[in-house]
Each structure stands twice: as C-alpha cells, then as structure tokens.
Image (cartoon, rainbow, N blue to C red):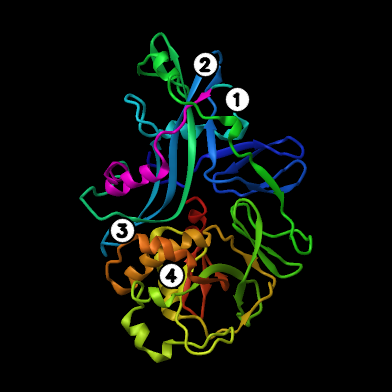
C-alpha cells in the first residue's frame, strides 16, 4: 500500500535489562532505554519477522490466524530509461495465494505497532508459500499495481533497480465467526470462508525462529562506548579511533579514511563509499568520456598508491532518488582526491551510515547510467560481482550554512530536509 509520507511503522519491545517498554523505528538497530539508560545493538538472522497485535477490545476471545505479508521499502530507479521516473517504494505483498484475502496491508495497519515474532502470543501462524524472490520477480515483471497506487505512470517500462531496500515479513491477524473471516485489526468482515480449509494449511514453527539478540554497544578492542545514532550500521570508537561495522549479528572492524578539511570550526562528517572499479567491470561501468580523458581530473591517490586513480563515489546514507544521484554525481565528477587523508576521528558530528555497502553498491549501475546517459541493464553477472568491488568508507567534512550542509571545495550542498527525509526511507 502506498505511503509517501515519512511515517513508517513503529516496533515495540521490552528492554532486556529492566523490562521497560521501548518503541523503535523499523530501521533502528540500537535500543536506548529511557529508564535504565542502557544501549544495546539489536541482532537477528535473515529478514526480521513481525506481528501486528489484534484490536483486543473487540476480539479478545477470538482464535486468530496470522497471515504473512512481505514488506519492502527503498529507492527505485529506472536505469534503462534516461527519462524514467525515480521514486520511493513502500509496499506490502500477500505471501500466500488464497482468494479473498487482501493483497496489501492498508493504511489502517500503520496505526498498530509491530512486535518481533520471537515473542509471539497464542495463535496460529501460517507458513508463507511465496518466497521473497518470487514476489520480487513478479514485481519486477509488472510493477504497475504499486505504480498505480502511487499515482505514477503505468506505461510499460523496463524493470527498475532498487537501492537501500528494507525487507521484512509482517503477520496480520484474522479470525473466523459465523462462517465469515474478519480482519483482526478493524473487525471488518472480508468474505465467507471455512475454518476447516485453513486448518489444513501448513503452520509456521514459531519455536524454531531465530531469537532476537542484544549486544552491548562497546568497542571490542578497547571496551569504550561506541558512538552512533540508532539507525546506523557503522559505529566509530573515539577512544581508539577504530570503526566497526554491524552486520546484524556481530561487530567487525573496517577500514576507513577521513578527508581533512584543514579548517577550524564545527564540522559535520557525511559518509561516502569510494569505489575502485575492477578491471573486469570497467567496460560495464564506464566513466564519462570527458572525465576519463581529462588528465587534470585524475588526482593522485592520497593513500600513497602509484599511478592515477578514478573512483566512483556513492553516499553511505539514504536520500531521495534525485538527491542521491545529485550527491553521487558531484562527488564522482570532482574526484576529491587532492585532500590529505587521515585515519583518526577528530571532533565533529558524524552522520549515521544507514546505507551499508551491500545495499549502496546496487547504485553503481544507476550512477554509471546517469553519468554516461547510456542504458545500463542489470544481469546475473552484476549481482555476482558488485559486492566484491574494492571499496572504502570515507568521511567527508561539511559546514552548516543555513538550511544546508555545504562542502565548499567541492561546491556540493545537501539540504538538512533531504537528510531528515532520508532517515525514513
């Protein structure tokens, strides 16, 4: 179901230390308890699974069936059409093939909070029949149902590319009464069904589901508190100047660099992924001819490497599709390698890395198509090789000027409103 406003579902759970209720956003990976002040990383394997608790004032004595839906949010780019519409997708898809059930969860569902399925109450949870890959394949072949809901043009077009997608399963409650099936959220009749037909369907083994794990937000090397906002994937340690990546299960140290501005004053560091295209992929992701042939645009590698380097640059944070391409284009065309790099963490505000490398790399064919004005088609070869590209996390200093963060040397400005909106994608 469409929702173009930056209002995502809320997730409710209890603090594992003191038991106090805590409300998080879907993209949050750090739990901060307002009562006991503990900060914990939230870890789980695979797709997170949530349930929507029924409206208990009306249906407190009902025996519920929970129906699975796939949910996806992210940026969609029409890379095969230069003039294609880029947009933000926020949709749910029924994970079963049972006639009469709603194909999408409506806006009413957003009034209810999500709960991790590992803490499921009583009820029967139906096993999803349709995998996410199958749902995704169907959507790529015909995105018109979601496009029509988003009031976009529905003319036939090549499959879009998606960046920064957040995928989860949501189980919605339904119940039977007097030969009818009812929506457990709004107590609305949906049609005639037999309970015996549903009792034959395979059930999900909730006892075998991976449990939600909680990890302390401390540096594995020195034991100091790690810095980072609630939706970040990367946490810096100001004590030992190390940077740690959280993959949903554990913390791993990663390499980084930081462009030294050489100026005093308050700094805001925005993270970018710097990509060194592999030789085998240069033909697939060509740089613009004027950039590739202009020697004065090829800067020396500040890390001490030999020869001239050309890199692609992609934001390590979510933005609207137009702002994402604008920032990527500006950084790639200007090749900011003349700066002196450094590998410590000076004082300043560090914007959260809420677009991990595994998702950001999907923007490489999009950026290449945007720069060269040439269609770039996706293929199995790309999906198998993009993640192996040489990449480095670099923090770029910006200054606050009015309502924008500005990088004077690169002539790049990013509005604070765009950054705020990106936190909800």
Q: Nearer the viewer, mark 2 or mark 3?
A: 2
Q: CA distance from mark 2 to mark 3?
A: 45 Å
User: Residue pushed farthest left?
Assistant: 155
Under circle 1, the secondary element is: loop
Q: CA distance from mark 1 to mark 3?
A: 42 Å
Residue for badge 2: 63
Residue at point 47% right, 29% down?
Answer: 172
Q: Which mark is residue 121?
A: 1
Q: What range of the chain is rendered magenta?
A: 124-148
Sort mark 3 into few (<14), some (14-19) or many (20+) by Cα contacts within 10 Å.
many
Q: Position of residue 186 (x, y in %)?
A: 45, 23
Q: Nearer the viewer, mark 1 or mark 4?
A: 1
Q: Which mark is residue 78?
A: 3
In the image, residue 220 lies in the stretch drawn in magenta: no
Residue for badge 4: 328
Q: CA distance from mark 1 to mark 4?
A: 46 Å
Q: Position of residue 116 (x, y in %)?
A: 59, 36
Mark closer to the chain start, 1 or 4: 1
Q: Quadrant of residue 269?
A: bottom right
Q: Quadrant of residue 77?
A: bottom left
Mark 4–mark 2 contact, CB under 8 Å?
A: no
């Amino acid at each position: 179901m469409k929702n173009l406003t930056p209002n995502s579902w809320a997730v409710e759970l209890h603090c594992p230390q003191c038991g106090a209720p805590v409300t998080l956003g879907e993209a949050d990976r750090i739990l901060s308890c307002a009562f006991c002040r503990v900060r914990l990383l939230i870890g789980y394997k695979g797709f997170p699974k949530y349930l929507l608790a029924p409206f208990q004032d009306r249906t407190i004595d009902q025996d519920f069936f929970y129906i699975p839906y796939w949910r996806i949010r992210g940026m969609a780019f029409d890379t095969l059409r230069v003039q294609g519409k880029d947009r933000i997708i926020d949709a749910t898809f029924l994970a079963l093939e049972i006639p009469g059930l709603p194909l999408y969860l409506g806006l009413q569902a957003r009034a209810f909070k999500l709960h991790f399925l590992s803490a499921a109450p009583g009820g029967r949870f139906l096993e999803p029949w349709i995998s996410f890959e199958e749902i995704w394949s169907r959507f790529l072949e015909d995105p018109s149902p979601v496009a029509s809901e988003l009031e976009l043009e529905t003319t036939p077009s090549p499959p879009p590319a998606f960046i920064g997608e957040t995928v989860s399963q949501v189980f919605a409650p339904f119940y039977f009464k007097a030969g009818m099936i009812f929506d457990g959220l709004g107590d609305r009749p949906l049609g005639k069904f037999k309970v015996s037909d549903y009792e034959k369907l395979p059930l999900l083994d909730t006892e075998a589901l991976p449990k939600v794990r909680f990890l302390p937000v401390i540096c594995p090397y020195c034991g100091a508190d790690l810095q980072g906002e609630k939706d970040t994937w990367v946490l810096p340690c100001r004590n030992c100047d190390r940077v740690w990546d959280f993959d949903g299960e554990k913390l791993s140290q990663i390499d980084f660099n930081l462009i030294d501005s050489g100026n005093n004053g308050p700094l805001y560091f925005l993270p970018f992924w710097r990509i060194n295209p592999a030789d085998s992929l240069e033909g697939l992701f060509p740089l613009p001819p004027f950039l590739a042939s202009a020697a004065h645009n090829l800067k020396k590698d500040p890390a001490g490497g030999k020869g001239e380097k050309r890199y692609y640059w992609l934001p390590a944070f979510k933005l609207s599709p137009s702002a994402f391409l604008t920032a990527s284009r500006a950084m790639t065309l200007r090749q900011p390698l003349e700066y002196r790099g450094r590998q410590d963490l000076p004082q300043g505000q560090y914007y959260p890395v809420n677009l991990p490398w595994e998702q950001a790399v999907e923007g490489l064919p999009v950026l290449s198509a945007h720069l060269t004005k040439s269609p770039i088609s996706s293929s199995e070869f790309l999906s198998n090789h993009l993640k192996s590209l040489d990449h480095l996390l670099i923090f770029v200093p910006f200054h606050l000027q009015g309502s924008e963060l500005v990088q004077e040397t690169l002539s790049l400005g990013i509005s604070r409103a765009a950054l705020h909106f990106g936190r909800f994608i």
